[in-house]
Image: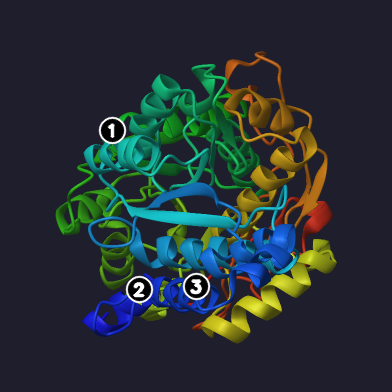
């Protein structure tokens, strides 16, 4: 912004003179030249009109919401940026309709870079300096776990979007809500699909951190319960070269027929491409599943190329068959503006803004406890269906969780295929193809 822009933005001209002040001076001079009798004759009328010269009608103070998420490396910034765009679209729509409580919505954005320490600092700034009444966003569970301590400390509600660790809601903080799925829901679904698809020997690899190990535990339990043989492996969350590890997996006897990856860090795409280039998976002998959200990221095909054909992943957005009018309108508007399909995380971010606004509207207040109550009693249809949030603590992770969060398993069968168009193989009521799994070609 230029100096001129700064001056104009604050109501001053390029010379630094206050335009409103000049108007007041001219008005005062004009009144001073009137005969005294005329001034007296004006009486109350003059007093009533004087404010039109002395000040303008004060605009309503905006209701400030804070958004957190990765907008630069090393975090998942490509998807974070789309989440930011979606939140902005929601705010624009709400303001075009008159805002809420007669006030506009303003969203203040903070880049967490996918780092917990950055998330802590971002939440502090939004709450202490910017005075936001509520927050939303995020893409990395580890960052959300740091941010939730801040919102709990200051009693500011937050709607987490694309974070799956059950620990986020299991802690029972009243300020914490989640409109995305969570590992107990998601990995149970994936494990059930693995069983139904008939795989006999699974290599299950996760990132070596609390998030990856928690997801692995759930998936492993499903496989154990269904007597599907598997072996567990871990990888450094910071690693980007997995050649040696994949060669060891390829050499295992009996051979693995399925490679299940629970890895959402920077190495996820190299793991997929190296698995393909080394002849491990996807191949006619071994299938591959990439869990963690990277499979529907807008940069997926750019990073994996042909290695993505035949790969399976989860999608946390509604399938086309389940789209309502709001979903259709949002997808059309988003794609028209940003030239890409919105992932499920973008829909979550969009709906999170509306959910917070609906909570404020229903209670008529921006007080934190009022917003929390408004979310606990919410019944609102968004782009991903009817939103309600559980108040049960059984199981512990169900507290303030969107229990009906949609999730499907899809399998790409074409290069550069949109997640909207990829065949859905599970759950069966939502499947768009008759098969459970399509064996990749060589």
Pick the front one: 144 or 302? 144
Question: What SS does tag 2 mark?
Answer: loop
Left or right: 22 in relation to 371 = left
Q: Position of residue 266 (x, y in %)?
A: 26, 57
Locate residue 144 relative to residue 315 in the image: left or right.
left
Q: In the rendered image, which residue does mark 2 sit on?
A: 18
Q: Position of residue 38 (x, y in %)?
A: 67, 72
Among the 4 quarters of the image, the one containing residue 209: top left
Q: Is residue 108 left or right of residue 116?
A: right
Asked if the residues shown at circle 2 and circle 1 are in contact, with their CB atoms under 8 angstroms apart, the answer is no
Mark 2 vs mark 1, foreground winner is: 2
Disc 3 element: helix
Q: Residues within 10 Å of mark 3 (few under 14, many from 20)?
A: few
Label 1, on which residue?
209
Q: Is residue 424 visible?
A: no
Count of number-bearing discs: 3
Q: Nearer the viewer, mark 2 or mark 3?
A: 3
Identify the residue under disc 3.
32
In front of the other: 328 or 147: 147
Disc nearer the start of the sequence (3/1) = 3
Colour theme: rainbow
CA gap, disc 2 and disc 3: 21 Å
Instruction: Note whether 167 is above or below 22 in the view shown.
Output: above
Are dots 2 and 3 in contact, CB under 8 Å? no
Q: Earlier in the sequence, mark 2 or mark 3?
A: 2
State which quarter of the image contains the C terminus: bottom left
Number of other residues with Cα within 10 Å of mark 2, as a class: few under 14, some 14 to 19, many 20 or more: some
How far across and down, in percent of the image, does residue 296 sit?
Answer: 51, 65
Residue at image location 48% in from the left, 30% down from the top: 220
């Amino acid at each position: 912004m230029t100096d001129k822009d700064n001056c104009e933005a604050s109501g001053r001209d390029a010379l630094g003179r206050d335009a409103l002040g000049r108007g007041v001076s001219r008005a005062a001079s004009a009144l001073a030249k009137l005969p005294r009798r005329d001034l007296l004759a004006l009486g109350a009328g003059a007093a009533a009109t004087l404010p039109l010269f002395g000040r303008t009608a004060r605009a309503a103070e905006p209701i400030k919401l804070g958004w957190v998420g990765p907008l630069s490396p090393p975090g998942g910034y490509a998807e974070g940026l789309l989440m930011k765009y979606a939140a902005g679209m929601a705010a624009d729509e709400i303001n075009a309709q008159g805002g809420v409580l007669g006030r506009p919505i303003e969203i203040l954005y903070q880049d967490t870079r996918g780092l917990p320490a950055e998330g802590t600092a971002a939440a502090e700034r939004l709450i202490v300096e910017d005075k936001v009444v509520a927050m939303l966003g995020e893409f990395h569970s580890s960052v959300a776990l740091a941010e939730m301590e801040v919102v709990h400390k200051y009693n500011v509600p937050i709607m987490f979007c694309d974070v799956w660790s059950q620990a986020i809601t299991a802690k029972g903080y009243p300020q914490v809500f989640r409109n995305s799925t969570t590992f107990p829901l998601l990995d149970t679904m994936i494990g059930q699909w693995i069983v139904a698809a008939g795989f006999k020997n699974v290599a299950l690899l996760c990132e070596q951190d609390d998030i990856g190990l928690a997801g692995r535990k759930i998936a492993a339990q499903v496989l154990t319960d269904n007597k599907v043989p598997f072996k567990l492996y871990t990888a450094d969350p910071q690693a980007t070269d997995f050649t040696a590890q994949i060669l060891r997996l390829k050499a295992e006897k009996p051979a693995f027929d399925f490679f299940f990856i629970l890895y959402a860090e920077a190495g996820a795409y190299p793991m997929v491409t190296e698995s393909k280039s080394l002849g491990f998976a996807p191949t006619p002998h071994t299938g591959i599943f990439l869990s963690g959200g990277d499979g529907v990221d807008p940069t997926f095909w750019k990073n994996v190329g042909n290695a993505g054909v035949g790969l399976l992943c989860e999608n946390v957005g509604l399938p086309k068959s389940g789209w309502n009018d709001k979903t259709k309108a949002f997808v059309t508007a988003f794609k028209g503006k940003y030239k890409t399909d919105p992932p499920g995380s973008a829909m979550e971010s969009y709906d999170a803004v509306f959910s917070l606004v609906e909570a404020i509207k229903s209670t008529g207040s921006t007080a934190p406890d009022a917003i929390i109550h408004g979310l606990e009693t919410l019944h609102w249809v968004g782009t991903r269906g009817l939103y309600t949030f559980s108040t049960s603590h059984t199981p512990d992770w169900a507290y303030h969780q969107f229990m009906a969060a949609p999730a499907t398993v899809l399998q790409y069968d074409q290069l550069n295929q949109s997640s909207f168009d990829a065949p859905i193989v599970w759950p069966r009521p939502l499947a768009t193809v008759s098969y459970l799994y399509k064996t990749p070609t060589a």
